[in-house]
Image (cartoon, helix red, strand yellow):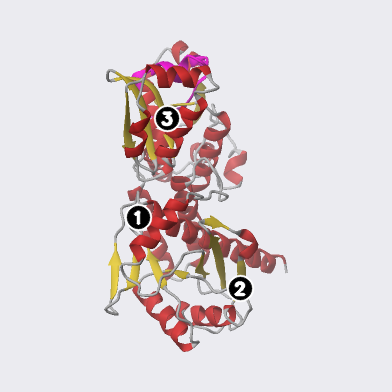
Amino acid sequence: MIDKKKLENLPTTFGVYIFKKKEKPLYIGKSVNIKARVRSHFENAKFDRKEFLIINQSDNIETIITENEFQSLILESELIKKYHSKYNVIWKDDKSYLYIKINFFDDYPKIFLTRKKDIKKEKNKNKFIYFGPFSSTKLIEKILNDIRYIIPFCNEKKISKNPCFYSKINLCSPCPNYIESQKDEDLKIKLKKQYKKNIKKIIKIFEGKITYILNDFYKKLKILSKKEKFEEAIIIREKIFRLERLINNPIRDFEINFIDKNNLSLLKKELSLYFNYLNRLKRIECYDISNLKDKNQTASMVVMIDGILNKKEYRRFKIKNQNLKSDFERIEEIIERRFKNKWSDPDLIVIDGGRPQLEKLIKILEKIGKKIPAIGIAKNPDRIVIKDKNKKIITIKFPQTHQGFKLISLIRDEAHRFAKKYHIKLREKDFLI
């Protein structure tokens, strides 16, 4: 029987845990907090026979830390498929497990869901790429739906003469039906390559190799913004947001909350090295500007209290002065408007951006007489920008698995989502006028 004392040394981050007996995996699981999840196995063993057998027959726990929740989901499925761990299948019909099936070697690779029992009946298994197993139909359908909005693909079994329904809403693009209808052979070849390139990207996602796809989107966004192609830039920005959300929250929605007070303590401990006056982190506010140089310039204020996103405290702003030419001027308007309200002062302010945004925020706070710690969170990769005790702006590259850092990443992503949602709402309103 495994010793409960081994819990003390387990990580409190994303990853996979493996209950083992003499190096043989008995049960494989994933969690956003490995230590807390494994502890729940011990507690449930008092009431559940399966859990009791897992604990009773194991002599060791191995853990594999991942950068995000999506990677832990993919790794868990790969390990279950590799080891056929006893207690991942004994209480469920193994044949019912779902797999993602891609007929990559076809002219137009399609993406389908299939069961293990159907894979066994498949005559030409080598012609397909499989990912899984996944135990939840709802989960994998949600993931595929999210991916389809990022990288369109086709799942119709046969090619027909007319573009499919999904092509009309840009979820199958370029549509194989449309490609086949083209008389220009050069165009046909070009579109075929584009479609297959999309499928290759989706395969990379299910292999957990997502960074290069994100970087490619960011490059496109930068180019489109410089060329002032703002409609196209908005589409790419939405894809970036969806992909980042998929990476970090594939299972849960933005209701995700890190309620473990240890995460706040970890964050406070790290930030206290740089601030002289960081007394507590009860209230954290994060600001994001959603703007692509059109008239619907908006901003959001997202609030985290005791490590939990508190939607009742969220505020959104439409920039009043639409003639402002930079995000720095917009930040100034928003911060000044925020502190004219009788809302509780934050213990920490987070701004979406790097050194220039943070310097501007600090100047605004000094101007209005607010001595509040402030940090920036820059992207690619995520890192914290901070003014240290020597009054120098420095960059801190926390490990992506650091739970305190994840709090900052979470509130930034939520601020971005909230600002973008309002931005799109105003744009749609204009379209209807």
Answer above or below: position of 250 versus 50. below
Q: Mark 3: which amino acid?
A: Gly
Residue identifier under label 2 = 317
Q: Where is the N terminus found, in terms of image quarters?
A: top left
Local packing at callout 3 (Cα closer than 10 Å; few below 14, some 14-19, many 20+) is: many
Q: Mark 1: which amino acid?
A: Asn
Whole-percent x, y for residue 275 in the image: 35, 72
- Separation (CA) of disc 1 from disc 3: 30 Å
Q: Residue at x 51, y 39 (%)?
A: 143
In this rendering, the label closer to the viewer, 2 or 3 = 3
Mark positioned earlier in the residue sequence (2 or 3): 3
Residue identifier under label 3 = 29
Q: Residue at x 71, y 65 (%)?
A: 432
Whole-percent x, y for residue 40 in the image: 48, 32
Range covered by the magenta-colored residues: 82-109
Residue 99 located within the stretch drawn in magenta: yes
Local packing at callout 1 (Cα closer than 10 Å; few below 14, some 14-19, many 20+) is: some
Q: Residue at x 41, y 22 (%)?
A: 55
Q: Secondary structure at mark 3?
A: strand
Residue identifier under label 1 = 215
Whole-percent x, y for residue 421 in the image: 60, 61
Q: Mark 2: which amino acid?
A: Phe
> Which mark identifies residue 165?
none
**What residue occupies the far right of the structure in this picture?**
433
Q: Secondary structure at mark 2?
A: strand
Local packing at callout 2 (Cα closer than 10 Å; few below 14, some 14-19, many 20+) is: some
99, 381: nearer the viewer: 381
